[in-house]
Image: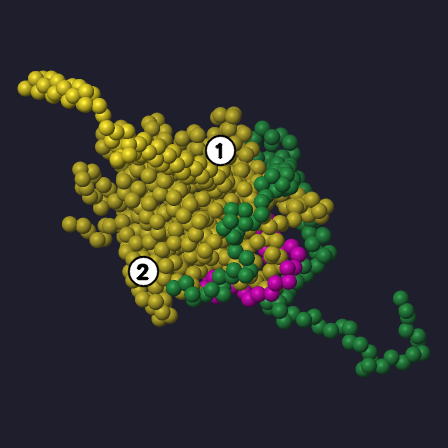
Chain colours: A yellow, B green
Amino acid sequence: MIDVLQINPGLWMIFAGMVCALVPKGEAFAHIRKAFVIMVPIFAAFMIFQINSGQEVLAGKIELGGLSLTTLRIDSLSLVWGYLFCLISVLNGIYGFHEKCRITDSSALIYAGAAIAGVFAGDLLTLFLFWELTAISSVFLIWKGGERAYGAGIRYLAIHVLSGVILLAGAAIYGQSTGGDYSFNYIGVENPGGILILIAIGIKCGFPLMHMWMQDAYPKASITGTVILSAFTTKMAIYALARGYVGTDILIYIGAIMTCFPVFFAVIENDMRRVLAYSLNNQLGFMVCGIGIGTEMALNGVVGQVFVHVIFKSLLFMSMGAVLYRVGTTKASELGGLFRSMPITAVFCLIGAGSIAAFPLMAAFVTKSMIISSVVYAAEAQGSLWVIVGMLLFASAGVMEHSGIKVPYFTFFSHDSGRRVKEAPWNMLVAMGLASLLCIVVAFPFGGYQMLYDMMPYVVDYHPYTVDHVVFQFQLLFAAITSFCVLKRFGIYPAEKRAEILDADWSYRRLGMTIVSWISAMWTRLASGVKGLRAKLLDNLGQRLYQIFSPAGAMSDAAPSGLSALLTAGMLVLTLIIMYVVM
Amino acid sequence: MAKTPKNKVVDMHSAPHNEEAPDYSDIHPFAVPFLFLGRKSVIENFIWLPLIGMFIMIILGVVYPPYHPAPWDVIPGSWAIIGYVAYTIIVLSARPLFSLLARSEDYYGEGGLPDPEYSTEHAEGSHD
């Protein structure tokens, strides 16, 4: 008998999403859906709260085909993700309140529910199930971006389903090596199954060269869709890494590369939502690097960074969504001076920008400092890691460039584009206001960041607001802003231009498609050639047979009687031999 | 500049009204007090703010050195140098990278990213 109070809380949201899909169209029913979208995550958070006992909870055990599944595991690590996903679902629900879209509402609930259920999965097979459900449910948010988003949605779905298939293959191999134990605990890269699972997770969290689905799909999704998408998939993957690969050295290097390469694409990208997608990739790099370091302090930093990142990244996507809603574009070349029309959105965007750039008193200052400090401590023991520290500092300046300066400056300041629009709708402002408040509260020196510490999986002994931390962080940030001002003043900072920037997806969208088209064309030509050859051969054969056996053919000619007698005798001999052998 | 003769009587009622109050009708009321941010002089002189801040922080950094110094922290203002150089490298890389990687917006034949003519605001309510 299943105890309904002990089922995976994500399932409640998935169920609510399915109900939403059945709610009829119409204004009155839209409000019912909206109530679902906002209230059900609160209910799910309550369910998490009542299940959580402070100890590890393992429940929802199912025997299926000889496999033992644990569909619910709540512990100090998964708990943070669970609450965070509920919190951001509520904010997203408020943000999308104006949008009367049944598909978005039901997708958002099922997607968020699948992500919550995924992080509470106690075994790899349950994880696989919800891993795939996040992909299938979220693709509708991309397709709601319109016709232009169709191809991106298909690619997104294909890549994520592939990730799930690799995860399943890895889980099967890993389960074999552990004697049928599919528990989702530390996995490591010591066996092939573990490597496959790491690749699957790597696709979802945007490892270098596996990242392009993010920059392809997110900017093309609907306004609300992009905000929702930015919160769950990648963070679910970070959870899986933190659960299964903590302390895996290769993650340090992968993470460091992830922090650096997106900044070069972000600086030349014109579309602000795509800039933020690159920025998201860059922020994930800090988390991956922290997981690779694997110390208690690094993991605390990662957990804290995930928490604040979801909030400030959503805030930035929300602000650009509001601009898209009012102006119709987020291309930097078309924007500028919008603080005159949308001052409240501009302030919220600046708070998000300050938070991601890790200004003291703003969200990421505490958590990013923890991650970088953990790498510094590791470098004191292992000198080669100073290179990683340098890369993280370089990337911090990069964050200041694309998210700290570029996004707010070219949207709300810079030259006046002359666009005069209305301020964002009230519900968007409320959602952005709450996110902004959280960005400040969780970094507040007196009782603020301590709340964040309370959520971390290990006891924290780290003081972010020491003089040296604040001073050196300000050095970095002020220097970056000074550089921007100098480059702008001397006309060196490049103008924003409309363009499609090629990235790794060129390999399958252009090169791959070209190769496939070439193979297809060659196949068509080959098939056509073979068909012609076959027709020619059959034609020739037919002609030959006709020449021999037709009434006018060679066999119809009158043969001499002697030859006929000889042939008949030959046939008789042959028949006798066969009969002798057979009988 | 032509001066008004002292003995000439200026008819104030017929004089053109050059000191009209600026028209803020298309500006959000909350933005009006901050319109000075768009002035050229403010934009040009903004640089002093981070510059002075940076120098103050460099001096403070000498007074309060880091508890866990990196090898480069022997140089005063090392983080400022890293921040400045990194930022400059990133921006300077933009031109060559753009030349190398930029293509037309419809390069992939999917219509690029949303434009003003494709405003989802105008499609409000039609998503059901």
Residue nearest the viewer, comparing A26 with A316:
A26
Q: Quadrant of residue A199?
A: top left
Give the image location of residue A421, x and y in percent.
57, 65
Residue at disc 1, secondary structure: helix
Residue at image position (52%, 32%) is A388
Amino acid type of the residue that numbered disc 2 sits on in the rendered structure: Ala
Please give left or right for residue A378 compared with residue A60 in the image: right
Please tell me whether residue A565 belongs to the stretch shown in magenta. no
Amino acid type of the residue that numbered disc 1 sits on in the rendered structure: Val
State the quadrant of the N terminus of chain B: bottom right
Mark yes or no: residue A109 visible. Answer: yes
User: Chain letter of disc 2?
Assistant: A
> Which of the two labelled residues, at mark 1 and mark 2, occupies the earlier sequence position?
2
Tell which residue pokes out farthest to the left in this image.
A583
Please give left or right for residue B101 compared with residue A120 in the image: right
Look at mark 2 in the image and give the residue it sits on: A21
Look at mark 1 in the image and give the residue it sits on: A375
- Which stretch did the figure color magenta? A405-430
Q: Residues within 10 Å of mark 2 (few under 14, many from 20)?
A: many
Residue at image position (49%, 65%) is B122
Alpha carbon distance from label 1 to label 2: 47 Å
Q: Where B126 falls versus A532 (above or below)?
A: below
Please give left or right for residue A167 compared with residue A252 in the image: left
Please tell me whether residue A418 belongs to the stretch shown in magenta. yes
Give the image location of residue A242, x and y in percent.
38, 38
Q: Where A342 falls versus A76 (above or below)?
A: below
Residue nearest the viewer, comparing B101 with B22:
B101
User: Chain letter of disc 1?
Assistant: A
Q: Quadrant of residue A194?
A: top left
